[in-house]
Image (cartoon, rainbow, N blue to C red):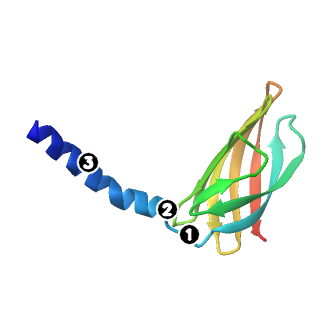
Amino acid sequence: MKRLWLCVAVVMASLVPFASAVQARTAYDGSWDLIFVTQRGTCDPTYDFSVNITNGVVTHPNLVKFRGYVAQSGAVRASVAVQDRYASGSGRLSGASGRGTWTGQSAGARCSGYWTAQRN
């Protein structure tokens, strides 16, 4: 029993630095405007909306199925689902701008392109 508690204590102690890093404020926190451009497929030509980054977590107030994360390095990963549309992407933020690529589906059609970001 002591051995089990020791293992649990070691695991919990190793998670503390990770939890602090996830909750740490990043240089990218704030409001960002995004533009998604379709290069392949029959999705809408462009999509644009704003997101907020807080402690490295990207959120959108009206999109329930939106997940996004920004690392301290500026690396970004995000995904969104709205009705029959789904997209995921990755890229990098640097200073007050960013760029990356995305792939997705809209009504069964596959699409892909690039995205750009500008800090508000």
Q: Quadrant of residue 14?
A: bottom left
**Mark 2 touching mark 3, by CB under 8 A?**
no
Q: CA distance from mark 2 to mark 3?
A: 19 Å
Residue 115 coordinates in the image, percent (x, y): 75, 55
Q: Is residue 21 above or below residue 65?
A: below
> In the rendered image, which residue does mark 3 sit on?
11
Tell me the quarter of the image containing the C terminus: bottom right
Q: CA distance from mark 3 to mark 1?
A: 26 Å
2 or 3: tag closer to the N-terminus: 3
2 vs 1, front mark: 2
Horizontal arrangement in the rendering, residue 116 relative to residue 58 (left or right): right
Residue 22 coordinates in the image, percent (x, y): 48, 59
**Mark 2 touching mark 1, by CB under 8 A?**
no
Q: 4 and 56: which one is in front?
A: 4
Q: 86 and 15: which one is in front?
A: 15
> In the rendered image, which residue does mark 1 sit on?
26
> In the rendered image, which residue does mark 2 sit on?
23
Q: Is residue 100 above or below residue 108?
A: below
- Other-residue count near label 3 (Cα within 10 Å), few / some / many at <14 / 14–19 / ≥20: few
Secondary structure under tag 2 reads helix
3 vs 1, front mark: 3
Secondary structure under tag 3 reads helix
Residue 30 coordinates in the image, percent (x, y): 69, 68
> Residue at the location (42% across, 63% down)?
20
Tag 2: residue type?
Gln
Tell me the quarter of the image containing the N terminus: top left
Tag 1: residue type?
Thr
Q: Is residue 84 above or below residue 77?
A: above
Horizontal arrangement in the rendering, residue 36 relative to residue 13 (left or right): right
Furthest toward the right, the residue is: 45
> Residue at the location (76% across, 47% down)?
113
